[in-house]
Image: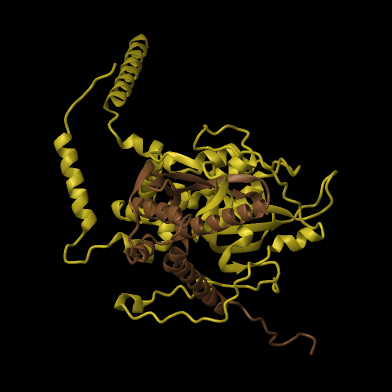
Amino acid sequence: MYVAVKGGERAIDNAHGWLAEERRGDRDVAELSVAQIREQMALAVNRVMAEGSLYDPDLAALAIKQARGDLIEAIFLIRAYRTTLPRIGASRPVDTGAMRCDRRISATFKDAPGGQVLGPTFDYTHRLLDFLLEAGAEVPEAETDEADMVPKPRITEYLGRDGLIEAEADSDAEPPDMTRAPMAYPADRALRLQALTRGDEGFVLGMAYSTQRGYGRNHPFVGELRIGAVPVEMEVPELGFAIEIGEVVLTECESVNQFAGSKTEPAQFTRGYGLVFGQTERKAISMALCDRALRWEELGEENVGAPAQDAEFVLSHADNIQATGFLEHIKLPHYVDFQSELELVRKLRREAGAADAHAEAAE
Amino acid sequence: MAQDSEAEATESRRGWMGLLARAAPEALAARVEALDPPLPEAEWLRVPQTGGVMVRGQMGGTGAPFNLGEMTVTRCALRLTDGTVGHAYVQGRDRAHARTAALVDALMQGERAAELRSAVLDPLDAAETAAHRDRAAKAAATRVDFFTMARGED
């Protein structure tokens, strides 16, 4: 039975009106501009771009403002907007080796060529609240040193020269695109990486953490972490050549993992890879660990039944928009569904009561 | 020879189209506003259209490609009265930015190339290089200099 019920328009309109007022907050406090959010809440903007899967800092900042700071709601807004955009094309694969690094560190080689460059990091801060920020103190200019405009060499290149790390197979194959075709399992690595890079940071972090705690342990080191801008180049058919269409800030993490070797491969290090829009290093490291855990089959490792090794489990639960859509729909009216369940429970109780009465009568 | 000069022309055009794509819309607008005569009229071949370009990464930074996510891009094409066609693909959603970039692209193929180079492109290029250098200088100041405090064998 389907019962159409009307009503609630006035309540909905008024709820949205009140939402707008609450979003604005106390009118005696200055309103936030989109530019202020973009510049001063940059890491929230980065997360919304990464998980919204659309690089546009102004749009992400607007989404955060509209969502009152609820980042999953903001990501939802960006995903919805993204579906309205015609697809102009696909870029050439970005060259992260040519990145202008703000930050570049290696946990494996102290004297990494190109140096350990900390960049604007929270690392080594004391995590004490800074009340000067509340007081609105002037921020001094950051220190500078002689600029080194040379791209940083890749750490894994050094291991690769001696064959100590698996070679990354090159390919020109058109990668699958989960925004164009439904996810299919088994998912190849290209599809897994796409799902992980737009996956929920908390979920991907949790899965990565589970591998560190022993659920599919794979002994990762952060071989290299780099954050910076890379140009994006695209082939333009009407021109007959490729041009740069802009640039994006990315965070890249290459994990270096132990591998004992197999029948066909000598003992060597293996790789996990993370690449995420924006300055998003927690996510990029998590992605690298998850990528490595999901590679158990191609590396001939044992499936120990760890959740992080189960591609279908990880990838179909990593998307916070899918998850929130299904989870939150249960708060919407289910009056009719519930009515039928209520009828059923009453009927079962009636029958059980009748049976009891019958049994009593028989005694 | 003809091939060489054609390759050079393509390389040069790739250079300015990239610069125009990356330029902040306000910075580009300020530069072209100062032009005399101003930017010419043109007819649309393709009105500005905002869309998404799927940005691709590579496994391990060097391996097989995968889809990372989209970025917003606005493109357009136009024709000057002398028949020169200008194209633009610029980052973001700013239609005026795309139109200006396409006009500059068209003018760079004609007699006003030198004027636009010095009045628009060179300043944008210099500003971009300076901004890159500033950031690199701040990064350089955060580079770790390790030193040994004490060794265990003494």
Q: Nearer the viewer, residue A283 or B62?
A: B62
Color of chain A here?
Answer: yellow
Left or right: A323 as drawn, with respect to B55: left
| Location of residue B36 by image quarter | bottom left
Q: Is residue B104 above or below residue A187?
A: below
Left or right: A294 as drawn, with respect to B26: right
Q: Which residue is painted at 66% across and 72% down in the image?
A: A114
Toward the top, the furthest residue is: A362
Q: Which of B29 and A201 is in front in this view?
A: B29
Q: Which residue is painted at 35% across and 35% down in the image?
A: A329
Q: Nearer the viewer, residue B84 or B34?
A: B84
Toward the left, the furthest residue is: A10
* Residue A40 percent coordinates (x, y): 37, 66
Color of chain B here?
Answer: brown
Question: Where, quadrant-wise, is the C terminus of chain B in this rendering?
Answer: bottom right
* Residue A161 percent coordinates (x, y): 79, 60
Left or right: B56 as drawn, with respect to A84: right
| Location of residue A134 by image quarter | bottom left
Answer whether residue B83 is visible to the viewer in this image.
yes
Q: Is residue B36 above or below residue A299?
A: below
Q: Which residue is painted at 50% across and 75% down in the image?
A: B134
Q: Which residue is painted at 61% across and 42% down in the image?
A: A190
* Residue A353 percent coordinates (x, y): 32, 17
